[in-house]
Image (cartoon, rainbow, N blue to C red):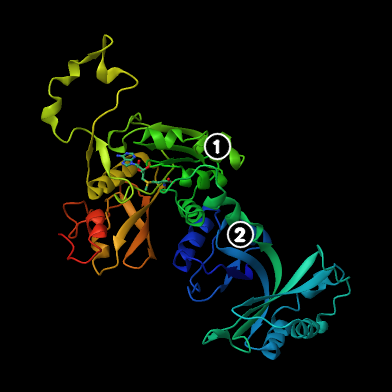
């Protein structure tokens, strides 16, 4: 029978938490409701089948700091004790003789050592007979407290308290985010995507062992590295051969080696995404990317801006070989609209993803009321999540679409139907001061 667990969540990017938890639970076939999730609070009760489910969730979610079998809650020690006595006495006999210790987790506030010990001792009625072990005890009983802040100081007493048996700690408690931080990564550039949000994106995209993940705008491979952490087989492409080759002996390959999962790097191809070289029947289980915004790197596709200049050039020979068939031939490139590129991306995903497969990509927008009208839509793709990371004058959105079957009739919103243009580059350099173009 399902029972209550308390999930302790990190407060970074709280707007992304519910989507990530739902995606992870769905991937792991865990039926759980996260309806009680509240972005302003780090503690969330959840009904789960057992410790195994709780552990799986904690090991996979980037937001979970810890999961605890919930023994009781209250607004002060007296109400906490009353709740523990009325709700959890059936758990106690299982822990009579094991070694144990008490721990305290405080959010936005803490107790001094003397208060902590007094609080721990107030649970003496549990009457555990096993030895107290500070290092590697069999069980850790944790009191979790949430304080509010008055001015800049924590309130004197917590608003809520819980007692839980620690079931599992999340990966972020074991330095995962530090190890994957860009400052420790062998190969990065100005386009590299931060580690925490890359990992969160790949969780929402449901990257997993046995799945083929593709990033069409690979750059330095931030999403591939994150997807490989979750065991996906990674493929990528980029129009810029230099970024894929790397420099000074450092490349996407050395990044994979650094994390010990080189075997998960399928390959990276130099390719214009809008003229892809894949066979038509090739399916990708998951597509994750950060398309070019046009700020640091322009949106470019193969082709000539002035086609007249190239008329008749197909027959130019270099050392007796047609120039455009040589390996060292550099194709002309022309600018392209971000809006058109996003439509191409959705069309590609609708053709290449299996039913249920996900497309997750980041799209820059500005902080105005017209953001929704810029979101591209495709009738075969359900827009499952539209998550915002706000900066001062602009924002970027993580859009997650799920491929649906033929019976699904979703919305279509291509660039010609979208009421507001995604001319992010122009607007960025104007400082977002003028009216958006329609
Ligand atoms: C925002 S960056 C992605 C950065 C990447 N996530 C990383 O970790 O470095 C966009 C990338 O798209 C590439 N790009 C631009 N136009 C492209 C096209 N038509 N086809 C494929 N790649 C393209 C750029 O060369 C650039 O590396």
The quadrant the N terminus occupies is bottom right
Determine the residue positioned at 17% across, 55% down: 417
Asked whether the viewer can see residue 1, the reply is: no
In the image: residue 376, left or right of residue 155: left
Q: In the figure, 304 relative to 313: above or below? A: below
Residue 172: mark: 2
Crowd rating for badge 2 (residues with CA inside 10 Å; few <14, some 14–19, many 20+): many
Q: Nearer the viewer, residue 199 or 423?
A: 423
x, y (%) of residue 330?
29, 27
The answer to whether residue 203 shows anywhere in this view is: yes
Would you say 298 lies left or right of 125 here?
left
Task: Examine the rendered structure and indicate whether residue 125 appears above or below residue 333.
Answer: below
Q: Quadrant of residue 58?
A: bottom right
The residue under label 1 is 254
Q: Measured from the top left, where is residue 35 in percent x and y?
A: 48, 71
In percent of the image, x 59 and y 86: which residue is there?
Answer: 159
Q: Quadrant of residue 238?
A: top left
Q: Is residue 115 left or right of residue 179?
A: right
Question: How far apart, in angstroms, are the residues tagged by discs 2 and 1?
Answer: 23 Å
Q: Nearer the viewer, residue 305 or 282?
A: 305
């Amino acid at each position: 029978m399902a029972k209550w667990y308390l999930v302790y969540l990190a407060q970074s990017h709280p707007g992304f938490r519910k989507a990530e938890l739902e995606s992870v639970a769905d991937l792991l076939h865990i039926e759980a409701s996260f309806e009680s999730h509240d972005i302003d609070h780090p503690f969330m009760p959840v009904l789960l089948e057992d410790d195994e489910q709780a552990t799986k969730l904690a090991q996979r979610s980037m937001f979970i700091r810890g999961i605890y079998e919930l023994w009781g809650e209250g607004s002060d020690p007296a109400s906490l004790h009353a709740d523990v006595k009325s709700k959890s006495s059936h758990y106690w006999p299982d822990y009579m003789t094991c070694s144990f210790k008490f721990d305290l987790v405080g959010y936005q506030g803490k107790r001094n050592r003397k208060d902590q010990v007094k609080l721990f001792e107030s649970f003496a009625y549990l009457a555990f007979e096993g030895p107290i072990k500070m290092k590697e005890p069999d069980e850790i009983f944790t009191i979790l407290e949430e304080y509010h802040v008055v001015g800049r100081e924590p309130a004197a007493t917590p608003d809520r308290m819980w007692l839980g048996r620690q079931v599992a700690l999340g990966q972020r408690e074991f330095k995962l985010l530090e190890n994957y931080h860009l400052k420790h990564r062998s190969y990065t550039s100005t386009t590299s995507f931060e580690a925490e949000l890359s990992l969160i994106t790949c969780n929402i995209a449901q990257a997993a062992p046995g799945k083929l993940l593709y990033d069409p705008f690979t750059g330095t491979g931030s999403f591939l590295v994150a997807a490989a952490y979750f065991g996906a087989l990674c493929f990528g492409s980029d129009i810029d051969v230099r970024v894929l080759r790397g420099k000074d002996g450092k490349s996407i390959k050395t990044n994979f080696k650094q994390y010990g999962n080189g075997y998960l790097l399928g390959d990276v191809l130099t390719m214009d995404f809008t003229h892809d070289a894949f066979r038509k029947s090739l399916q990708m289980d998951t597509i994750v990317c950060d398309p070019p915004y046009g700020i640091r790197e322009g949106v470019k596709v193969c082709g000539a801006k002035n086609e007249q200049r190239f008329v008749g050039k197909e027959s130019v020979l270099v050392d007796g070989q047609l120039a455009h068939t040589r390996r060292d031939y550099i194709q002309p490139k022309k600018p392209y609209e971000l809006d058109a590129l996003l439509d191409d991306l959705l069309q590609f995903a609708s053709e290449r993803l299996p039913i249920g497969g996900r497309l997750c990509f980041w799209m820059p927008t500005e902080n105005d009321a017209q953001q929704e009208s810029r979101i591209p839509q495709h009738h075969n793709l359900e827009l499952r999540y539209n998550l915002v990371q706000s900066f001062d004058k602009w924002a970027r959105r993580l859009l997650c679409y799920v491929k649906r079957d033929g019976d699904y009739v979703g919305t279509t919103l291509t660039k010609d139907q979208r009421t507001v243009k995604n001319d992010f580059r122009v607007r960025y350099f104007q400082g977002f001061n003028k009216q958006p173009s329609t």
